[in-house]
Amino acid sequence: MIPAVLGLILAIGQGTAGQDAAGLRLVDGRYLAGVRAAVSFVSADSIKAVRVLSALEDATPLPGLPPEVPSGVLFVLAPDEGEFVRLTGGATPDWGAGVA
């Protein structure tokens, strides 16, 4: 798997039902927060994290939805495939998170 695409969009909206926030932490993880989204990453991926946050914040609003939607998005930039598998449990979560 290509490290640049080991990302996981974990939640859309605050307090999403079924979300286990404690299990989503990266060891030595850092956070960048924007208006609509936050990115969790390890320090070695800080440049990628800035680019991901910029892409999420600058995205064109979704048709038919208010400009502030989505909000509360947490994007975890997994540092390697092992961490990606740990975060996802090896499968797409049943609560509908986006995995790429």
Image (spheres, rainbow, N blue to C red):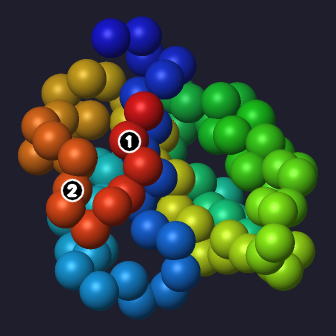
Residue 55 vertical placement versus 19 (above, below): above
Quarter of the image with the C terminus in it: top left
Quarter residue 10 falls in: bottom left
Residue under the point 81% across and 72% down: 64
Mark 2 or 1, nearer chain start:
2
Nearer to the camera, 23 or 58: 58
Query: Is residue 78 shown left or right of residue 47?
Result: left
Pointer 1: residues within 10 angstroms few (<14), some, or many (20+)? some
Which amino acid type is marked by label 2?
Pro
Where residue 28 appears, as percent x and y from the top left, is 36, 50
Residue under the point 42% across and 49% down: 98
Nearer to the camera, 62 or 20: 62
Element at label 2: loop
In three-dimensional space, the C-alpha distance between marks 2 and 1, rounded to whole angstroms, equals 9 Å
Residue 88 visible? The answer is yes
Where residue 50 appears, as percent x and y from the top left, is 74, 41
Query: Is residue 65 shown left or right of residue 98?
Result: right
Residue 62 vertical placement versus 78 (above, below): below
Which amino acid type is marked by label 1?
Val
The count of marks equals 2
Asked if labels 1 and 2 touch by Cβ distance under 8 angstroms, the answer is yes
Mark 1 lies on residue: 99
Where residue 26 appears, as percent x and y from the top left, is 32, 51
Nearer to the camera, 7 or 22: 7
Where residue 85 appears, as percent x and y from the top left, is 17, 35
Residue under the point 26% across and 68% down: 95
Q: Which mark is residue 93?
A: 2
Query: Is residue 78 shown left or right of residue 77?
Result: left
Residue under the point 50% across and 86% down: 14
